[in-house]
Image: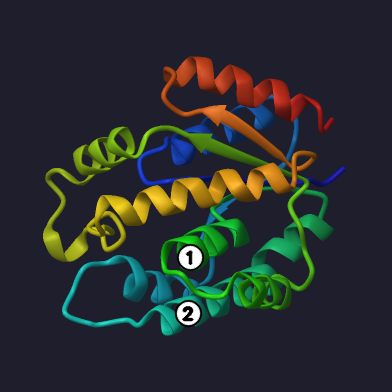
Amino acid sequence: MERFVTFEGIEGCGKTTQMRLAAAWLTGRGISVLSTAEPGGTPLGLKIREVLLNRGSLEIGAEAELLLFAAARAQHVREVILPALRGGKWVLCDRFADATLAYQGFGRGLDAAFIRTLNDFSMLSLSPDRTFLFDLPVETGLTRAEGRMAGVRPEAAEDRFEREDQAFHERIRNGYLNIAAGEPERFRVIDGGADIETVHREVCRHLAELF
């Protein structure tokens, strides 16, 4: 039985690590898993990811940013996610449509109703079976993110969003919590400030609900 599970949260929340551990846990139980990420997952998505996430002199307006994320998602869903689900795989995705509403809606201040409509269009009406939101204070997340980027060449660093001010990230965190409160049946909000193993055990407990 296929499942679509997404991992969300602010910068440095630990979602990527937890998705990797969840994939290994599921695989160990005989479940076929595809792990992917947004923006990315396809050749087009990776090109868009480079434009959106890497620092550089290229200026990207909020509206253009929104549409680039939507374009990457539309290709990702059609080319990768839906075929995997139809093939009986579980698909784990590092960020999905909720990130667009949190970052471009709550963070950038673009119209939330329009973003929801655009999200529905770009994900071909697909919706996750479960979404994990790893919540923690913004200061903690940004400190972690800075540590992750240490030693990475500036031109290769995917840190365009990390370089935004703290108020931007606070709006995103509050946005995520607002989104999760509106869909309690889909979301599981997890304390991202706990140690990796504690968080992993909680993720596994919730994944088992989907068996």
Q: On the picture, is 103 further left or further right than 59?
A: right
Q: Position of residue 198 (x, y in %)?
A: 51, 15
Q: Quadrant of residue 177?
A: top right
- Contact, mark 1 vs mark 2 (Cβ under 8 Å): yes
Quarter residue 153 falls in: bottom left
Q: How many marks?
A: 2
Local crowd size for mark 2, using a 10 Å CA cut-off: few (<14), some (14–19), many (≥20): some
| Quadrant the C terminus occupies | top right
Residue closest to the eye, 18 or 60: 60
Res. 194 in view = yes
Dot 2 corresponds to which residue?
A: 68
Where is 153 relative to 33, above or below?
Answer: below
Q: CA distance from mark 1 to mark 2?
A: 9 Å
For label 1, the residue is: 39
Helix, strand or loop for disc 1: loop
Q: Quadrant of residue 78?
A: bottom right
Front label number (1 vs 2): 2
